[in-house]
Image (cartoon, rainbow, N blue to C red):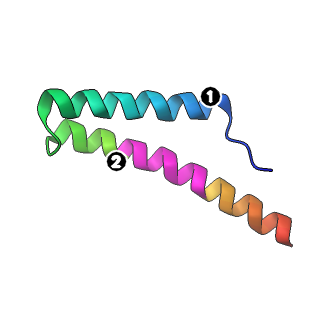
């Protein structure tokens, strides 16, 4: 079973909340909100990559 570390989960949740607050304050299309969204995407992509790598390793 693949587990996301608590630290990584907390980092993602913190970034998600930051994005939400930026969107409320500056709007969904503001540069700040979009930049934060891209940072969140990177965190999520890292996890997806790690999960995919783990699954492939398990299959082999």
Indicate the position of residue 42 as horizontal and vertical percent values: 45, 49
Most foreground residue, 6 or 38: 6
Tell me which residue sits at (61%, 58%) in the image. 49
> From the viewer's perspective, is 25 left or right of 15?
left
Label 1 residue SS? helix
Q: Quadrant of residue 3?
A: top right
Indicate the position of residue 26 as horizontal and vertical percent values: 13, 31
Magenta segment's dominant SS is: helix
Most foreground residue, 3 or 57: 3
Q: Which mark is residue 38?
A: 2
Q: Which mark is residue 20?
A: none
Indicate the position of residue 6 as horizontal and vertical percent values: 65, 29
Q: How many marks?
A: 2
Disc with the residue nearer the chain's start (1 vs 2)? 1
> From the viewer's perspective, is 38 left or right of 12?
left
Q: Range of the magenta residues?
A: 39-48
Q: Is residue 49 magenta?
A: no
Tell me which residue sits at (13%, 37%) in the image. 27
Which residue is identified by label 1?
7
Most foreground residue, 35 or 3: 3
Local crowd size for mark 2, using a 10 Å CA cut-off: few (<14), some (14–19), many (≥20) = few
Eyeballing the image, is 57 above or below 22?
A: below
Eyeballing the image, is 8 above or below 60?
A: above
Label 2 residue SS? helix
Local crowd size for mark 1, using a 10 Å CA cut-off: few (<14), some (14–19), many (≥20) = few
Q: Is residue 45 magenta?
A: yes
Q: Quadrant of residue 48?
A: bottom right
């Amino acid at each position: 079973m693949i587990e996301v570390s608590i630290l990584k989960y907390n980092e993602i949740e913190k970034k998600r909340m930051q994005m939400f607050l930026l969107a409320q304050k500056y709007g969904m299309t503001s540069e700040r909100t979009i930049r934060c969204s891209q940072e969140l995407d990177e965190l999520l992509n890292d996890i997806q990559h790690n999960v995919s790598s783990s699954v492939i390793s398990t299959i082999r």
